[in-house]
Image (cartoon, coloured by chain):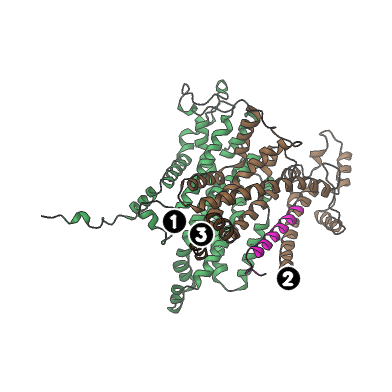
Amino acid sequence: MTDTRTISEPKPKGRAAQWLAMLWADKFAFFAALFLLIAVLCAIFGPMLLGDLATKQNLRGRNAAPFDLERGWVFFLGADALGRPLLARIIVAAQNTLMVAAGAVFFSAIIGCGLGLVAGYSRKRSAQWIMRLGDVIMSFPSLLLAVIVLYMLEPSIANIVLVLAITRIPIYLRTTRAETLEVRERMFVQAAKVMGASHKRIVFRHILPVVFPTLVTIATLDFAFVMLAESSLSFLGIGIQAPDITWGLMVSQGRPYLTNAWWLSFWPGLAIILTTLSLNLLSNWLRIALDPTQRWRLEMGGRKNG
Amino acid sequence: MNSFIGKRALASAVSLVGLVILVFFLSRLTGDPTNLYLPLDATTEMRDQFRELHGFNDPLIVQFGRYVGDLLQGNFGDSIRQARPAMDVVLEAFGWTLTLAVITMSLVTAAAIVIGSLAAFKVGGVFDRIATFFSLVGASAPDFWIAIVAIVVFAVNLHWLPTSGTGSVWHWILPVAVLFIRPFGLILQVVRGSMITVLGSAYVKTARAKGVRTRPIIFVHGLRNAMLPVITVIGDQAAAILNGAVVIETIFGFPGIGKLMIDSILLRDFAVVLAAIMVSALAIFLMNLLIDIAYAILDPRIRY
């Protein structure tokens, strides 16, 4: 009796399992995804669970040194100038930090992609105007604009999202338009047109799915950029205002105590750097995973480079 | 080429005019500078005199008309804060920023090109992995945080370098080093990616088959063709510094245009803000022009 099944093809796996396997094939990307998952969980549940702890002042524990478990695990990273536990504050601040970046990326991607599809697909003059609009936004010194707008409109979370979203629109606009221009001429779009498909159907069922992977990759990278921009604004004192907290604001709050309590600025900065690094690594992985001609590198489970 | 430059100049001028109008009105909406400059117990007459002196009493549109009229005569208005022509203040600060940008970007370009090319030559090798990892970390790091950590380590603890200000060569090291990191990471990635594509092309294979040695292949055959996308990124990054490395200049107390802009906005020194915008817009226009010329030199097929 011979068993021939051992050399047969492996069973076809579910989609989720396939993606997980591809993620596991790139260890850096795997840990990046894991870290981001933890960060997102912190952002969702952190304020609920640790909200009180993060704002409770304890003047006896001012600038308590890190790596000391005597006061409890939330003080593992030390305490800030008012004796509030840094670890709890970093977890709670994840919400604002990620929310601002996610909001800005979401709105700029939707608006930019929509305008880009119109500009690339339509042959009317309005398409030209959309591109000029993008150029004008691009030529603005974005940080300066943000400073003026936030100084005028009160630095609230919604306004910061608004300013950052506007400055990032051209990125999506240009990419979507360039890809749409190219995809529009491909055979399957021509075929759909000949068969009498409506413009709406062509744009959403034939062009958008081709453009989408690029957009996801860019959005991941841009998320990191927007997070850094928000941190810079908060650091300069024109972003999020206390008592709200973000990681950038925490770095700025720790600045006066640099000489005797480095941990006040160090840990939130590390949180920023780890998050942006994870996003960059994940974006690299996405670029390969979403590209049908490159995907084998991950499916083979071998080395992936290039 | 000339008509191309003309078109570009026109497009830039249009968006600059739009920007100046926008900033003029937006910045005046932020409030009246009087209270920022006069003491709390200043009398009403003193306040009125101050407003009269700087022309804040007229309606906005009249103020704008006067500003445009002055501009056409080459007068950019006076700085309230420093009581001298706004353009003088801006040009002085711009000189500092320009020096900073030139030093930083030449170091970044040289380092990124050499290391990126070497990494691309043996994809997946030890050197490549180390270079890729550091470029990713560099591109992800928030510069204000690196600046703070660098100050703590090198200025506060080791006493090797001054914390802020200008005056000696030593003052330049920290700002340049911190500004170096992000562009270096980004440009290195582009050099590596572009170089990998070029090294896989037919003419490089031909050169290798003819027996050309490694170094000429990288730096003669490869580099010139790999440079086009690299130059674009170099331009973007240089523009970012020229636009004012606001955060870094603030942290290091560097008297550049970024710090000047943010101080002027916060103190409602409107003439300086507008002059600074115009100067940096002109600088960025000239730089983009230089980049386009560099394209044409590197790739003779490009014609404008």
- Quick one: B160 or A227, which is closer to the camera? B160
Q: Find residue A288 and name its label.
A: 1
* Residue type, label 2: Ser
Vertical comparison of A252 with B215: above or below: above
Task: Provide the residue designation for mark 3.
Answer: B199
Q: What stretch is highlighted in magenta?
A: B279-304
Q: Main SS type for the magenta part?
A: helix
Chain identifier of the residue bearing label 1 in the image: A
- Quick one: B238 or B267, which is closer to the camera? B238
Local crowd at mark 2 within 10 Å, few (<14), some, or many (≥20)? Answer: few
Question: Would you say the residues marked 2 and 1 are in contact, meaning their CB atoms lie under 8 Å apart?
Answer: no
SS label for mark 2: helix
Task: Provide the residue designation for mark 2.
Answer: B3
Q: Which of marks 2 and 3 is in front?
A: 3
Give the brown chain's letter.
B
Vertical comparison of A69 with B83: above or below: above
